[in-house]
Structure formats: structure tokens, C-alpha cells
Amino acid sequence: MMGLLIGKMYEILLVMLSLLAGWGVVKITREEVVAGRKYFQAICLGALLILTAFILVQGLSWMLLIGVLLGLGLGLMLKQPYFYFGLLGMMTAWGFSHDGFVLLVGVFSIGYCSLSHYKLSWRWLGLAGLFFLVPYVFLLIPSSAIFFSFYFSIFYGVAIGGFVHVARGLYSGT
């Protein structure tokens, strides 16, 4: 299990670096960020839609639909997109594209940091990173690989359900 987590370190590192890149973009272009809000919303929504399409192409199943319902419920309480990205990042071990995941989360991070410029701080970046890492903790549990590989469709669905609330938040300003 530890080997699986070590193999995912580059994904974790690249997502964390994309958060820092988003923070850098906001710090350099503070005035343009407000004017480009609709473009950043489109970038974020596009990344979420592409990630969702990748999941749906892998196969629609009852377990995926159950996961979507669970994700819709969880998304009411937890609107932090990096938790759902953490779920997807963890699931790259079972078929989700590593490179596509890192690229899309990186693009999303730059747009999302720009949209969240008014609350962007080291604390905000730390919390986003922490929420991203929470699902990876489950990879340290010895029997978790069997559990996640069997129920991966549910976790994909939870991510889709959570993305619905994240997308809604992009346009409502929360």
C-alpha cells in the first residue's frame, strides 16, 4: 500500500504546485482577475465537465449513480473541490488517466484561485491542500486497495456529485 502512495507522489506534488501557480497568477494580475471572472468561471467549469466526461466514458453503472447521489448529499456540506479531486487522484490507480487528471486539476486550480482571489491566503492554500490529501490517507490502510478497486464507481460518482455543488458555487459566488 505504501508503494501505491509513493507512486502517486508526483500527482500530489503537481496539484500542490498548480495551487501555488494559481496563487502566483492572482498576486501578479490582481486587477485583471476581477475583469476576467467569466473566463475563469468558464475555465473551471470546462475542467469539471471534462473530468466528469472522462468518468462517464468509463462506464455508467448503478454503483456510479449511487455514488452521484452520495456526492450530491456530501456536496451540500463540503464544497471544497480539492477533496473531490483527491478522490479522483486516489482513483487514478484503478484506470483514471494520470496525466489528464493532473493537467485538468492544474487548469482548474489557476482559474479557481483567480475566482477566490478575495479570500486567497496561505491558510486557504493549506486547507485546499489538506482536503486534497485526505482521501490519500485511506491508501495507507492495508486492505483499502481491495475495497477501492471493487467500489471505484461509487467514488467516481461521489466526485461527480460533489462537482455539481462546486460548479453551482462557481456561479453563485460561494
Image (spheres, helix red, strand yellow):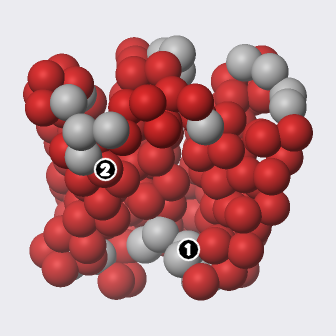
Residue 105 percent coordinates (x, y): 43, 39
Between residue 64 and residue 103, name the one nearer to us.
64
Q: Are marks 1 and 2 in contact (CB under 8 Å)?
A: no
118 lies left or right of 46? left
Question: What mark, if any, has residue 79 been given in the picture?
Answer: 1
- At x 47%, y 69%, the residue is 80
Question: Residue flagged by tag 2: what amino acid is it?
Answer: Phe
- How packed mark 2 is, by other alpha carbons closer than 10 Å (few <14, some 14-19, many 20 or more), is some
Residue 142 place in picture, x, y as percent = 24, 39
In the depicted structure, whether residue 78 falls above or below residue 20: below
Residue 114 visible (yes or no):
yes
Q: Residues within 10 Å of mark 1 (few under 14, many from 20)?
A: some
According to the image, label 2 marks what residue? 138
* Image coordinates for residue 143, horizontal then vertical, percent: 32, 38
Q: Hey, which quadrant is residue 124 in on the image? A: bottom left
Q: Tell me: 68 left or right of 90.
A: right
| Viewer-nearest residue: 64 or 146 | 146
Give the residue drawn at x 37%, y 32%: 145
Q: Which mark is residue 166?
A: none
Q: CA distance from mark 1 to mark 2?
A: 20 Å
